[in-house]
Amino acid sequence: MYPAWFHVENEHEIPSPALLFYRERIDHNLKLMLKIAGGDAKRLRPHVKTHKTAQVIARQVELGITQFKCSTIAETEMCAANGATDVMLAMPCVGPNANRLAQLAVNFPQVQFSGIADDAETLRLLASAAQQHRIILGVYLELDCGMGRTGIVPGDTAATLAHAMKDTPGVQFRGLHAYDGHIHDESIDVRRERCDAAFEPVLRLRCRLQGEGVVVKEVVAGGSPTFGIHAAHPDRTLSPGTTVLWDFGYGDKYPVDLPFQPAAVLLARVISKPGPNRITVDLGHKSVAPEQPQPRVRFEELPDAVPVMQSEEHLVLETDRAHEFTIGQTLHGLPRHVCPSVSMHGEAYVIEIGKCTDRWAVTARNRRITV
């Protein structure tokens, strides 16, 4: 019998808890992203917050993907340093961050950097930083298409702000950004219906702006659950993130229309057997995202185990199969939410053809690299 896909020949050399990246599966997911985008790398602007890793950026660049979307200045710098040509910071720049973004534009003159704005003050901060550094920053109008987190509702006020972007020295109006992270229904039909309804005001605003002489060069749309829906519209740039590594939260919901492979695993070991039907593993809040409901991690060897207690370093599982496990035995877990789970690890152990061959720093785990 062949070993299970998550088997690692030399895992006895890996201290736990640990983050494992399966290189062939990452490659599969990147190529599937390209396929869903119609084979056109220029339509992709993947969000890097999921993996935060320089080597994954470099591999995407090898595949022709050179535009990226980020949440932090550190992620933005990581992209620029690893072959990106166009990087969008999809977080309003407040405090010193506008100046930090402008400094990156000075440090990496071959890269187009852009921010977002949903308010005149955010636009002013970006423009002021650009003018002080004598560079041009791109700016996207951040639209609220139903999530209610950031953004301005498409309408008269949004149109006025877009005109201000077009006319403000130091910035160049690049287009619209509309993230529909509130849409994650299991049914593809329901998801499509909600996505289309949420995006209709965005399309009307684009049409209005272009009729008023404001050139909308790009519309950056959606996240992972609506990736395939937006991909059917060739006038949209696609920005999935979780698709690179995947997790069981999305994997359970979208096995048909988004058949990505889990490519990140959390390695844990049994450290105690506190009762006849209990085992304790070394995978606490510090190693897997704690903001999700339990189970926050699903173990491939023990998918039906019931988590009964979790603290900073420990996870206690209840299972009728506890007698099958020995102290020190490894377990391989898929996180429910991979993005914040990755950020809890300083490095990932790289698995190729069933063996650990390298370690990659989670480059943008911290919020500062150099600027």
Image (cartoon, rainbow, N blue to C red):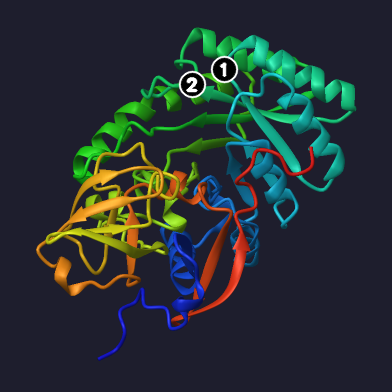
Residue placed at 65% from the left, 54% from the top? 66
**Other residues around mark 2 within 10 Å, as few (<14) / some (14–19) / many (≥20):** some
Report the front residue among 325 and 350.
Answer: 325
Dot 1 falls on a residue whose secondary structure is loop
Give x and y (percent) for residue 122.
66, 16
* Residue bearing mark 1: 118
Report the front residue among 184 and 286.
Answer: 286
The reply to whether callout 2 and callout 1 are in contact (CB within 8 Å) is: yes
Looking at the image, is mark 2 or mark 1 nearer the viewer? 2
In space, the residues marked 2 and 1 are separated at their CA atoms by 7 Å
| Residue 209 versus residue 47 in the image, above or below | above
**Other residues around mark 1 within 10 Å, as few (<14) / some (14–19) / many (≥20):** many
Give x and y (percent) for residue 128.
80, 17
* Residue bearing mark 2: 150
| Residue 64 versus residue 176 in the image, above or below | below
Is residue 2 toward the left or the right of residue 153 in the image?
Answer: left
Tell me the amino acid under the disc marked 1. Answer: Asp
Report the front residue among 296 and 260.
Answer: 296
| Residue 314 versus residue 264 in the image, above or below | above
Q: Quadrant of the N terminus?
A: bottom left
Residue 208 shows in this picture: yes
Residue placed at 31% from the left, 39% from the top? 292
